[in-house]
Image: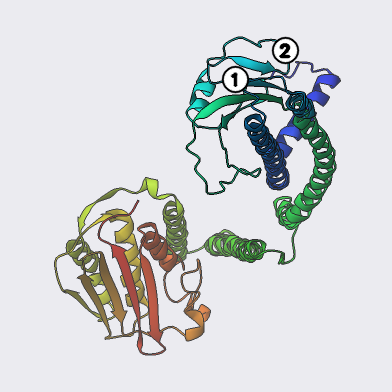
Amino acid sequence: MNRNTFIPSGELGTISRHRIVFTYLKSLKFRILLVLLAAGWIPMALMAASLLSSYHSRAVSSRTTEVQNQCRILANQFINYHYLDNASSELIDGELAQLAGMYDGRIIVVDQNFRAIKDTYDLIEGRYVVSEEVIRCFQGETTNQTTAEGFIEITVPVKNNDTTAADGESTGKDNSSPVLGVLLVSMSTDSIKVNVEALTGNAAVFFLVYGILVTALAILFSHLLVRPVDRVRSELHEISSGHSADDLAVKAYTETEQISEEFNKIVTQMRVLDESRQEFVSNVSHELKTPLTSMKVLADSLLMQEEAPVELYKEFMGDIAEEIERENKIITDLLSLVKMDKKAASLNIEPVDINDLLELILKRLRPIASKKNIEMVLESFRPVTAEVDEGRLTLAFTNLVENAIKYNKENGWVHVSLDADHKFFYVKVMDSGMGIPEESLDYIFERFYRVDKSHSNEIDGTGLGLAIAKSAVLVHKGAIKVSSQLGEGTTFSVRIPLNYIA
């Protein structure tokens, strides 16, 4: 955005509000709130809908059964009063009118000629009623259905000597008598709808109160459930802000307890790393400053002597040259260590004959070993070819063998062995040297660490060799271990995959 672009304060406020809303919608608290609301609202809504639907179905079914039973009673009276032959019985007419009025419906009596002999609405008397339901009823089948308009339509057959009881169960007599007529009944379900609407209103009030309570509890619980996570986030914010933090101990949940443990491990590692960096800077400063101090002392000594002899100049210049070489070696090792610390993407991986590589390393170092009359032996159990960065691995093994020579005794020995299996190759560098104290074994791979600091100036080196070797091995996804007995010798064991693992 152009720095000269002006955004009105109102728009800035809107953007800020939108960002806050968007952040909340993505938060764990909001998602827990949604889960709790869904767990509270959805089952209740489904239960309410199910109960109302069940009530409506049961009410319609009960009304249908009740009307059928009443119609069967009337059908028996039709036979007794010969109503199908002469539809002029005031008693039967009154009962038909009463039944139709009671259920807010309409009753039509159809004789065996399909002619309507009675209609409580007085609309189709004398007309013929031929429909599927009437035909099926003349075949002896009682039918009932609910129309789309909300009416219950029932057909009841009228049989001679009908022995069906009022409750609709057979008395055991012959029910195969011919059908003499049909009662066609149509009943309104308005009263049922009114009851359902009243229940729906009551349910809506209950549901609203219940919903408010569920929402309030969901908001409360979502806040309480996320509080331990907020505490962890707060501690992480303290760390990212550069402030030191005490150990985190959030034990509300198993997950937060595990996060706390991992967090404390990271904090501890950060502290150790920070101390290591400070110590490294201090060591680098000391190691680089020492040769410079020596060169300055030598140069000042020469400058203080106006007519110093040539021999003295040559001696001092030789000493200065040695200090320069020492400074150069320290810088070279530091650069090598920096390269080792880079990502594996910078590796130059290719198939390398490890037997030839080790033979070449020992050949280069034999002149140094011969000065102390140290015997060097390479033992190869089988030919080994591996996918490695030859330059880095050469530097690692060179440092291990060179250390075995430097810290060895006169007339000692250095034994290098090579073996492999189907996944790894193994290199051991053993010597007969002075050994390493047990308390120093955990620190020998640290940069500039010296086991015997009193002899650090007597033995040539920068204290970076083992750090370089370890970095080279680790970048190949390998492992390096050390075992030693003080005064008896040291063994470095290296394991590296035959095939490089990216």
Q: Is residue 132 above or below residue 435?
A: above
Residue displayed at 73% across by 47% down: 40
Q: Residues within 10 Å of mark 2 (few under 14, many from 20)?
A: few
Label 1: state its secondary structure: strand
Residue displayed at 38% across by 64% down: 469
Residue displayed at 61% across by 66% down: 265
Q: In this view, does 323 lie to the left or right of 234?
A: left
Along the line of sight, which residue is nearer the eye, 199 or 148?
Answer: 148
Q: Is residue 483 left or right of residue 62?
A: left
Q: Which three-letter amino acid code belongs to the residue tagged 1?
A: Val
Q: Where is residue 25 in the image (x, y as percent from the top left)?
A: 70, 37
Q: Is residue 422 above or below residue 30?
A: below
Q: Position of residue 77 (x, y in %)?
A: 67, 33
Q: Which three-letter amino acid code belongs to the residue tagged 2?
A: Asp
Label 2: state its secondary structure: loop
Mark 1 → mark 2, Cα distance in angstroms: 13 Å
Q: Where is residue 481 in the image (x, y as percent from the top left)?
A: 38, 74
- Mark 1 and mark 2 in contact? Answer it, CB < 8 Å: no
Q: Is residue 243 above or below residue 18?
A: below
For the N terminus, give its image quadrant.
Answer: top right
Q: In this view, does 190 lie to the left or right of 77?
A: right
**Disc 2 designates what residue?**
122
Residue 311 in sight from this viewpoint: no
Query: Quadrant of the rendered structure where residue 239 is?
Result: bottom right
Q: Where is residue 103 in the image (x, y as percent from the top left)?
A: 76, 29
Q: How crowded is mark 1: few (under 14 residues within 10 Å), some or many (20 or more)?
A: many
Along the line of sight, which residue is nearer the eye, 249 or 63?
Answer: 63
Along the line of sight, which residue is nearer the eye, 79 or 236?
Answer: 79
Q: In this view, does 188 lie to the left or right of 281?
A: right
Residue 110 marker: 1
Query: Which circle's residue, 1 or 2, is located before the other in the chain?
Result: 1
Residue found at the far bottom of this picture: 487
